[in-house]
Image: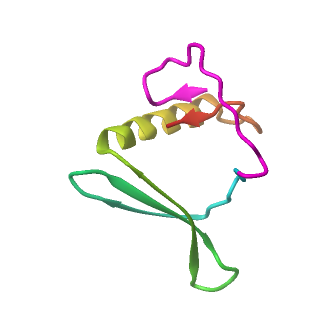
Amino acid sequence: MIALNGDKNQGLEVSVNPDTTPVVYTDNVQMVANEDGVVLDIGQRLGATNQIRIVSRVGMSREHAKKLIKALSDVLDSTSGQSQTGKVARA
């Protein structure tokens, strides 16, 4: 697990209820940023149309967004060629 909050994952226990926290597929992310932060609109294309349905919105500080970029890059680099990562990026 890669933590973005500086905890170094020491003594950190993460629990996810799959009934209330589904994994949502995305093929579209729109981003808006200003001096205060970043908002990600995470969406899915509706079939062969030009329509996108937003399935989640995530807002964060600019500093946290920079940490997310680094963590995502690290996870992708360390799992290149693997079918399953076993890593979770935590905000």
Percent position (x, y) of residue 51?
A: 57, 83
77 shown above or below 19: above
**x then y, percent, for residue 72:** 51, 38
Is 36 displayed left or right of 30 in the figure? left
Residue extent of the magenta highlight: 1-20
Magenta residue check for 36: no
Q: Is residue 11 left or right of residue 39?
A: right
Q: Nearer the viewer, residue 89 or 70?
A: 89
Q: Residue shown at 44%/58% (left/top)?
A: 40
Q: Residue at x 44, y 39 (%)?
A: 68
- Residue 88 image-quadrant placement: top right
Instruction: Identify the residue at the far bottom of this view.
Output: 49
Residue 63 appears left or right of 26: left
Q: How many marks?
A: 0
* Residue 67 position by quadrant: top left
User: Which of the two residues, 63 or 84, is positioned nearer the viewer here?
Assistant: 63
| Quarter of the figure with the N terminus | top right
Q: Residue at x 70, y 52 (%)?
A: 23
- Up the image or down, 79 lies above or below 49; here it is above
- The colour scheme of the drawn protein is rainbow
Measured from the top left, where is residue 2 in percent x and y?
55, 27
- Counting from the top left corner in percent of width and height, residue 13 is at 65, 23
In the rendered view, tell whether residue 52 sits above or below residue 42: below
Q: Residue furthest top?
A: 10
Which image quadrant for residue 39? Answer: bottom left
Residue 7 magenta-drawn?
A: yes
**On the picture, is 61 further left or further right than 13?**
left
Q: Residue at x 20, y 52 (%)?
A: 35
- Specify the principal SS of the magenta part: loop
